[in-house]
Amino acid sequence: MSYIRINTFKSRHRYSGLFRKAALLPALLGTALMTSGPVCAEVQQPETSDSVMQDNILQWNLWNTFVRNNYSDGRIIDHWENREITTSEGQSYAMFFALVMNDRQMFDKLLEFTETRLARGSFENNPVSWVYGPDTPAVRKVAGEKITQDGNFIASTNNATDADLWIIYDLLEASRLFNEPSYKNKALQLISFLKKNCLYHSNVMGTLMLPGMYGFVHDDYITLNPSYYPSFIFERISKEDPDFKIIFNHTISMVLKSAGQGWFADWVDFDLNGHQIIRTDTVGSWDALRVYL
């Protein structure tokens, strides 16, 4: 198991095709993970040609267009159905790309919004809200019943551990790249929060990482999301906290167990004896796609 070591890019002509792959983040990571040994998010020096140069400029334009249309003062804004929401997942991916772009200013703004608004000022004491947006019926419907008020905005008091794990990874890599210990300290705070609030301990299944604080442990079953557990992220975090190797091994064994028919579902349920519960409405869709990549 290897983790992706981010290399920042300072020249736009060094990496042909990066943004074509980066347009879908899982595709970029999936390509890297298919290699053996330690891998990097860097694309090799391309041959110099007019077509390559144009391709590079195009990929930067794709990223710049995304930022221009979806970024505002530390927030990545989802405009779908005019809800104007921000999700922790969107923040975590944008932080990753800010590192790849060597854009520390943008990274810091994304981090500040994530910590002050989504985590209400503390990664260690509060969940990173998975969704944040204006106080409208549409956003309330998405956020669910457990919400907190932030002026004219609301935020779910539940988290999404896939985004949390990405944020930890981003912070650890930022600390290394910028030689700034405060990023690592924040990562360790979020690690501590997840260990206190998002683990499920079972004599049968071991110690599992839940998809969030609430809604995944029931009287007679638990729910997991197979796409939440990228191996390279756990590998990186385990260098700071060895417990994450155990957590990953136990969690991924249940995830793999759910794919006995050769495909992954978006969400899977297990009874307390570790047996998968087959639902008639189980689907493998856009969420499960991340597993294969």
Image (tube, helix red, strand yellow):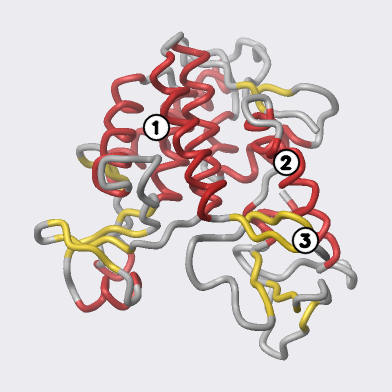
Distance from Cα at disc 3 to Cα at disc 2:
12 Å
Residue 284 x %, y % = 69, 71
Q: Seen from this angle, which residue lies furthest front? A: 203
Q: Which residue is mark 3?
A: 255
Residue 24 x %, y % = 56, 46
Residue 164 relative to residue 241: left or right? left
The three-letter code of the residue at mark 3 reads Val
Distance from Cα at disc 1 to Cα at disc 3:
38 Å
Residue at image position (53%, 52%) is 161
The three-letter code of the residue at mark 2 reads Ser
Residue at image position (52%, 42%) is 23
Q: Which residue is mark 1?
A: 61
Residue at image position (16%, 57%) is 150
Along the line of sight, the residue nearer the viewer: 60 or 197:
197
Of circles 2 and 1, the one toward us is 2
Closer to the N terminus: mark 1 or mark 3? 1
Along the line of sight, the residue nearer the viewer: 79 or 126:
126
Residue 101 relative to residue 235: left or right? left
Closer to the N terminus: mark 3 or mark 2? 2
SS at circle 2: helix
Quadrant hosting residue 4: top right
Q: Seen from this angle, which residue lies furthest left? A: 151
Residue at image position (69%, 39%) is 244
Of circles 1 and 3, the one toward us is 3
Whether 263 is drawn above or below 234: the answer is below
Dot 1 and dot 3 residues touching (CB under 8 Å): no
Residue 135 relative to residue 197: left or right? left
Residue 165 x %, y % = 55, 43
Q: Which residue is mark 2?
A: 231
SS at circle 3: helix
